Image (cartoon, rainbow, N blue to C red):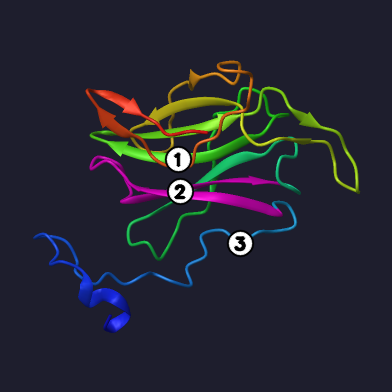
Amino acid sequence: MVDGGWSTLPPAPRGFVQRPSVLTNNMVAPNSKKLAYAHMATITRMPTAAPWRYMTAWQTGEWVEGAHGQHFRSSFSDDGEKWTTPVVIPVARDDKKALWAPVLFTHFDHVYLFFAESVSCLRPAGDGKPERWAPGGDIRMTRSKDGVTWSLPVTVYTQATKGGIPKLISNPPEIVNDKFLLPFW
């Protein structure tokens, strides 16, 4: 392998970059005293009519993973270097539970947000930590044309299905026969 393995790549299709570079040192939103926990970032290119080119989202909370009120925030950019001030994505049914694993996916003129929302499996407090939700829950989905105004979320797969085990996602779906094929575990 020569040049870090890049020479072994087949020629890029027309319109694609053969040797992409990576944007680095671009912190969208550093943790703070108010939001000490952040995890599971996702990014998508926005629909053409949206006011920004890119959207990123992540799960965040005041203290530790799974604490009450764990929610999603998002930020927008035109160039991938400068990002807007993060805003809350208002999709929780109950702000005392936890949201998990945001996955953004753009299809035609909408950006979709798939995620899991805790419905049970609250772990007791201990070792100096508050009671916390185990990861996962119902798999839910919402959509938006601009990343700011969202439809009411719908549940696409319940935790109760197949044994009551909390469900999680981490990858975007594929479209198969006009249906979402969404991997989860």
User: What number is the disc on residue 30?
Assistant: 3
Q: Residues within 10 Å of mark 3 (few under 14, many from 20)?
A: few
Residues at marks 2 and 1, CA–CA distance in whole angstroms: 6 Å
Q: Residue at x 42, y 34 (%)?
A: 183
Type of secondary structure dominating the magenta stretch: strand
**Is there CB contact under 8 Å for labels 2 and 1?**
yes
Magenta-highlighted residues: 36-61
Q: SS at mark 1?
A: strand
Residues at marks 1 and 3, CA–CA distance in whole angstroms: 20 Å
**Is there CB contact under 8 Å for labels 3 and 2?**
no
User: Which quarter of the picture shows residue 182?
Assistant: top left
Eye-nearest disc, 1 or 3: 1
The residue where tag 1 is placed is 103
Q: Amino acid at mark 2?
A: Thr
The residue where tag 2 is placed is 42
Q: Amino acid at mark 3?
A: Pro
Instruction: Find residue 38 and report its horizontal and vertical position in percent.
Output: 62, 52
First-in-chain label (3 vs 2): 3
Q: Residue at x 56, y 17 (%)?
A: 162
Which quadrant of the figure contains the N terminus?
Answer: bottom left
Instruction: Find residue 184 and report its horizontal and vertical position in percent.
Output: 48, 33
Q: Is residue 39 above or below residue 163?
A: below
**Is there CB contact under 8 Å for labels 1 and 3?**
no
Eye-nearest disc, 3 or 2: 2
Check if residue 52 falls in the magenta segment.
yes
